[in-house]
């Protein structure tokens, strides 16, 4: 789906760093990127997901190794854990979170803002049901 979503815009490229069949944790990806010399690292994340950061696997290590760019939306609230560096990205017109998109898809709704090719893939493979 990432390839389909990025195919229409040459500014984006899909990374294969998380490929595999095992569960992928953010800290593992961060450590892989850091090991290649890609630093500093910034983690772009929605406010709703960042609000749950303290539930993540090795979350203290995550906040120690990256700076967060938190995309806010009206009514979104979160607290910044001690030691985390956060930059807010305001002004994007993202009225819906990825969690809400998945929830709507699980209900069988297709009125979600995803590229047409991605929606076709989701429907064809019966995802999020």
Image (cartoon, rainbow, N blue to C red):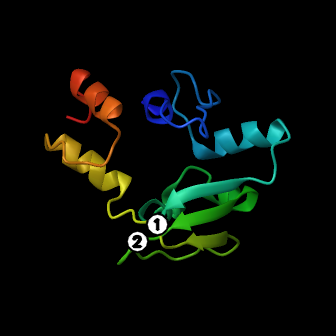
Residue 76 percent across, percent down from the top left? 39, 74
Label 1, label 2: how many angstroms apart (C-alpha)? 8 Å
Q: Quadrant of the N terminus?
A: top left
3 sits left or right of 122 in the view: right
Residue 12 percent across, percent down from the top left? 59, 38
For residue 22, above or below residue 90:
above
Residue 44 percent across, percent down from the top left? 58, 56
For residue 82, above or below residue 40:
below
Q: Would you say the residues marked 1 and 2 are in contact, meaning their CB atoms lie under 8 Å apart?
A: yes
Callout in the foreground (1, 2): 1
Q: Residue shown at 56%/49% (left/top)?
A: 57
Residue 122 percent across, percent down from the top left? 28, 30
16 sits left or right of 96 in the view: right
Q: Residue shown at 46%/62% (left/top)?
A: 52
Name the residue tied to disc 1.
92
User: Which element type, helix, strand or loop, lies under badge 2?
Assistant: loop
The label on residue 73 is: 2
Q: Residue shown at 64%/71% (left/top)?
A: 86
User: Which element type, helix, strand or loop, lies under badge 1?
Assistant: loop
Q: Residue shown at 15%/44% (left/top)?
A: 109
């Amino acid at each position: 789906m990432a390839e389909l979503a990025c195919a229409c815009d040459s500014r984006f490229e899909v990374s294969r760093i998380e490929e595999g069949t095992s569960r992928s944790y953010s800290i593992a990806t961060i450590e892989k990127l850091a090991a290649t010399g890609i630093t500093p690292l910034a983690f772009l994340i929605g406010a709703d997901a960042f609000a749950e950061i303290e539930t993540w696997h090795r979350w203290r290590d995550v906040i120690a190794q990256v700076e967060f760019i938190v995309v806010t939306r009206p009514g979104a609230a979160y607290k910044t854990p001690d030691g985390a560096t956060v930059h807010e990205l305001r002004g994007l017109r993202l009225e819906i979170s990825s969690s809400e998109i998945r929830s709507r898809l699980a209900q069988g709704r297709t009125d979600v803002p995803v590229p047409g090719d991605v929606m076709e893939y989701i429907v064809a493979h019966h995802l999020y049901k």
